Image (cartoon, rainbow, N blue to C red):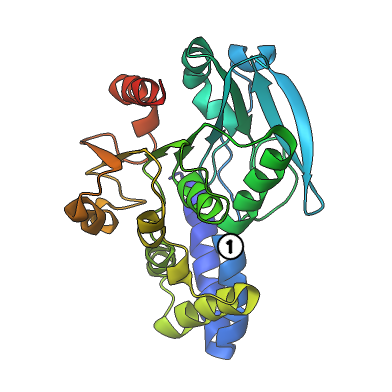
């Protein structure tokens, strides 16, 4: 984190906590907006393979969402879903191997990311993006998702499950409750603000943050699943996954790495090989 970023965070933290003294509800609304806003911007130069893609747009609830497609004549379809503050470009290393497996490959820039419109993003919105895309191109035979993309794919599969689709979760955002707690700890927000943020979710969706949980959804899914997670992940901690690992579901294969953290994990050669083998 550079000096400018440190100053911005200091000012945001001070503003949120001062607002909380005056109004918990107002502070929670501000905090939730920040929670849903991607500030970090990944690389903007397209990798060479993206210059060979067919680019297209879809409309998702009034927002133009940008996508990329390769190998339209493939015998099966796979969708790559990136994480928060990421974009489709970051997964260029997977495109050619997936084409070689016979897949038509799709990769989307989620709302508020990459070339897509919007300023904020939620997991239900990304799940809706997948629904709209499937309505246009048909159900996918495979999904590869990282971080925030993981809970989005899980929510979509809970509602529109294709049990034969192979699911790859790489460091998925397993528990939204954990993400909220980590966010509030980072900005030093008290429990009243965190509880009111949860109330914002309830008023909007009729469910609590605990509903947005891959651990909750997985017992309802019978898909073949490859779950890759790192012991040193400080964004989506392995401790959230441990209860699921202990259950040892027959349909889930776990790969636990060490030393890769949250963002390097999908760039690792061993991880790439495991993903491609699984999707083959």
Q: Residue at x 68, y 17 (%)?
A: 72
Q: Residue at x 59, y 50 (%)?
A: 38
Q: Quadrant of the C terminus?
A: top left
Position above or below: 201 against 153: below
**As drawn, which residue projects farthest toward the left?**
246
Q: Quadrant of the N terminus?
A: top left
Quarter of the view holding residue 146: top left
Other residues around mark 1 within 10 Å, as few (<14) / some (14–19) / many (≥20): some
Residue 134: percent from left, percent from top: 67, 40
Q: Residue at x 54, y 74 (%)?
A: 16
Q: Nearer the viewer, residue 181 or 251?
A: 251
How many numbered callouts?
1
Can residue 228 be seen from the camera position used here? Answer: yes
Q: Nearer the viewer, residue 152 or 249?
A: 249
Position above or below: 160 against 46: below
Q: Nearer the viewer, residue 125 or 250?
A: 250
Quarter of the view holding residue 103: top right
From the viewer's perspective, tell me whether residue 71 is left or right of residue 98.
right
**As drawn, which residue projects farthest toward the bottom?**
22
The residue carrying mark 1 is 34
From the viewer's perspective, tell me whether residue 267 is left or right of residue 130.
left
Residue 150: percent from left, percent from top: 46, 46
Q: Which secondary structure lies at badge 1?
A: helix
Position above or below: 105 against 215: above
Residue 190: percent from left, percent from top: 41, 80
Position above or below: 34 against 164: below
From the viewer's perspective, tell me whether residue 17 is left or right of residue 22.
left
Q: Residue at x 35, y 51 (%)?
A: 236
Can residue 112 be seen from the camera position used here? Answer: no
């Amino acid at each position: 984190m550079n000096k400018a970023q440190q100053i911005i965070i200091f000012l945001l933290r001070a503003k949120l906590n001062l607002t909380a003294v005056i109004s918990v509800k107002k502070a929670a609304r501000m905090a939730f907006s920040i929670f849903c806003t991607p500030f970090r911007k990944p690389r903007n130069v397209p990798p060479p393979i993206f210059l060979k893609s067919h680019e297209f747009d879809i409309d998702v609830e009034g927002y133009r969402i940008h996508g990329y497609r390769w190998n339209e004549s493939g015998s099966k379809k796979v969708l790559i879903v990136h994480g928060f503050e990421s974009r489709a470009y970051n997964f260029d290393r997977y495109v050619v191997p997936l084409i070689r497996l016979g897949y038509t490959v799709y990769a989307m820039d989620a709302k508020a990311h990459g070339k897509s419109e919007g300023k904020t993003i939620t997991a239900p919105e990304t799940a809706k993006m997948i629904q709209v895309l499937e309505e246009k191109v048909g159900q996918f035979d495979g999904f590869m998702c990282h971080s925030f993309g993981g809970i989005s794919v899980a929510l979509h599969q809970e509602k529109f499950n294709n049990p034969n689709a192979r699911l790859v979760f790489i460091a998925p955002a397993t528990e939204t409750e954990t993400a909220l707690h980590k966010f509030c700890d980072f900005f030093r927000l008290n429990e009243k603000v965190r509880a009111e943020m949860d109330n914002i979710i309830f008023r909007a969706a009729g469910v609590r943050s605990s509903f947005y949980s891959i651990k909750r959804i997985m017992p309802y899914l019978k898909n073949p699943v490859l779950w890759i997670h790192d012991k040193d992940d400080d964004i989506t901690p392995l401790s959230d996954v441990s209860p699921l690992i202990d259950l040892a579901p027959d349909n889930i294969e776990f790969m636990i790495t060490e030393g890769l953290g949250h963002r390097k994990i999908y760039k690792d050669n061993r991880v790439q090989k495991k993903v491609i083998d699984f999707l083959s």
